[in-house]
Amino acid sequence: MFRIRTACTVGFVFVCACTEPDQPIADLQTSSDPADTTTGSSMDDDGDGIPDDAEGNGDADSDGLPNVLDTDADGDGVGDGAEGQGDEDSDGVPDFLDPWGIPVDTDPGEGLSGSRCSPVIPCQSLLTCWNGVCVGEGALRFSLSWTVETDFDLHVRTPSGEELFFAHRTGDGGELDVDDCVGDICANPGEVHVENVYFPLSALPGSYQYWVYNWGCTTEGTYALAVFEQGEPQETQEGFLPATTVDTDSSMTCGISDEFIFAYGI
């Protein structure tokens, strides 16, 4: 709500500036000017006649608006434009909220599992935006992310022994709903890649085993794993997967992570 009110204030000041371009600074420094609520300080870093404490310490991005009236997503008193946020695609959304340069009126996949998301491109109900990708959320969730252009695969074994992965996507109430890369072909090249196994309604109590294979075999890289209960983070794991052949008890013979254990509901 704060950001919306700030945006409206900026719009109001802009209109006033356009209708009275020659209005002198002295006229703006009246008790009715919301930007001139001085508390007695005489410091005026930008030399505009308005004390710094009345305008959030100057006009850092030199856009004619005091910092306090600039859009300021992180609330530090410096407008977003002064902090390198920018707006590369000129859609009115700062780049940090619009990392793929997608205008807000562009359909990014309707917020479905596996589609890209951001604070201004939301996911559909019962999904959450994780590392820029919509993933299923529920009672229990295991999420994998990595950045190299190759196929890392998440495996989750339930307490009953059911193993969920790309070739066996559902079981024990769980589902692998996002599989970002197949071989060296990824849905979002150059972005964070994601795989996700979640249990939307309930999950069996007991010990869950989870791990990562480097199925692509062509590129080594780091990975991050996270476990969530009802959307709340419980534990994280990080590691490195080589692209060399290793001996396993399955058909997958490239880099493999440690096998992690998460105790759920016990």
Image (cartoon, grey):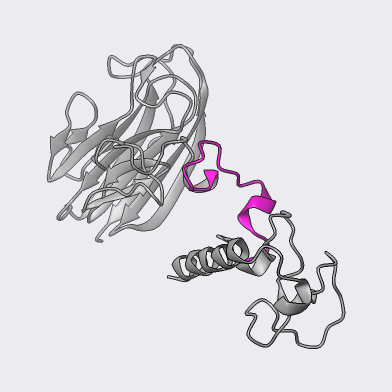
Q: Is residue 208 magenta?
A: no
Magenta part, dominant SS: loop
Residue drawn at the location 81% of the way across and 68% of the way down? 48
Classify residue 256 as left or right of residue 83: left
Q: Is residue 93 magenta?
A: yes
Q: Residue at x 33, y 28 (%)?
A: 180
With respect to residue 251, does 115 lie above or below?
below
Give the residues in magenta: 74-95
Give the percent coordinates (x, y) of residue 89. Answer: 51, 36
Q: Quadrant of residue 51?
A: bottom right
Taking depth in this image into account, of 157 and 146 the one nearest to the observer is 146
Q: Is residue 77 visible?
A: no
Q: How many marks?
A: 0
**Looking at the figure, which quarter contains the C terminus?**
bottom left
* Place of residue 67 in the rendered image (x, y in percent of width and height, measured from the top left): 68, 65
Between 2 and 30, which is closer to the camera in this rendering?
Answer: 30
Q: Quadrant of residue 208?
A: top left
- Along the viewing direction, whichever of 59 and 107 lies nearer the viewer: 59
Q: Residue at x 40, y 46 (%)?
A: 118
Quick one: 204 or 230, which is closer to the camera?
Answer: 230
Above or below, comparing residue 177 to residue 74 in the picture: above
Left or right, 163 with reference to 141: left
Q: Residue at x 76, y 66 (%)?
A: 58
Is residue 125 placed above or below 35 in the rendered structure? above
Q: Is residue 174 at least partly visible in the picture?
A: yes
Q: Where is residue 76, by image quadrant? A: bottom right
State left or right for residue 196 relative to residue 29: left
Q: Position of residue 150 (x, y in %)?
A: 43, 19
Q: Work out which quarter of the rendered image holds the N terminus and state it.
A: bottom left
